[in-house]
Image: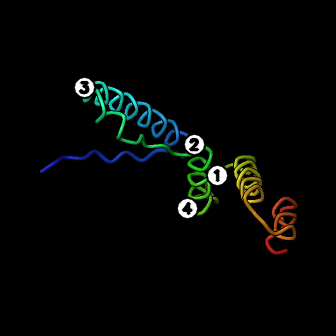
Amino acid sequence: HMSHDVVILCSDCHLEIDRQTKIRMKNMEAELRSKMGGKAASSVSPFVEDQQLSHIRSWAIALVRSREKMPTEKVERYEKTIRNYLASVCNHEEEKEALLNGKDEP
């Protein structure tokens, strides 16, 4: 049996905790790699996560779950950032333009 504490956090605090957790995981990985030494350490690929995508995902979830509770400026900032990211990975010019102009449909 393992005990777990559940702590409800705002999206900004969640992002900071997530960042700190990843730092701790990298430190633990470095420690483990140094203990393994030699070929074994170099044959294990490191865990890499796209920080920008992590923020985009967290902000999108925050908008879906708590849009009505969030300040208007934050909603607008999150939406703009998400739209810009989606436009940057979009291959269709019409959809890209719609995203950048804040339209739901091309």
What crowding class fits label 1: few (fewer than 14 Cα within 10 Å), some (14-19), or many (20 or more)?
some
Q: Which element type, helix, strand or loop, lies under badge 2?
A: helix
Q: Report the residue at 29% width, 28% height from top.
A: 38
Amino acid marked by disc 3: Lys
Look at the picture and state if 16 lies above or below 89. above
Quarter containing the C terminus: bottom right
| Amino acid, disc 4 | Arg
Residue projecting furthest to the bottom: 105
Q: Secondary structure at mark 1?
A: loop
Name the foreground residue: 25 vs 105: 25
User: Residue farthest to the left?
Assistant: 1
Quick one: 29 or 16, which is closer to the camera?
29
Question: Label 3 belongs to which residue?
Answer: 35
The three-letter code of the residue at mark 1 reads: Met
Label located before the other in sequence (3 or 4): 3
Q: Nearer the viewer, residue 33 or 59?
A: 33
Image mark for residue 62: none
Instruction: Kindly identify which residue carries mark 4.
Output: 65
| Amino acid at dot 2 | Gln
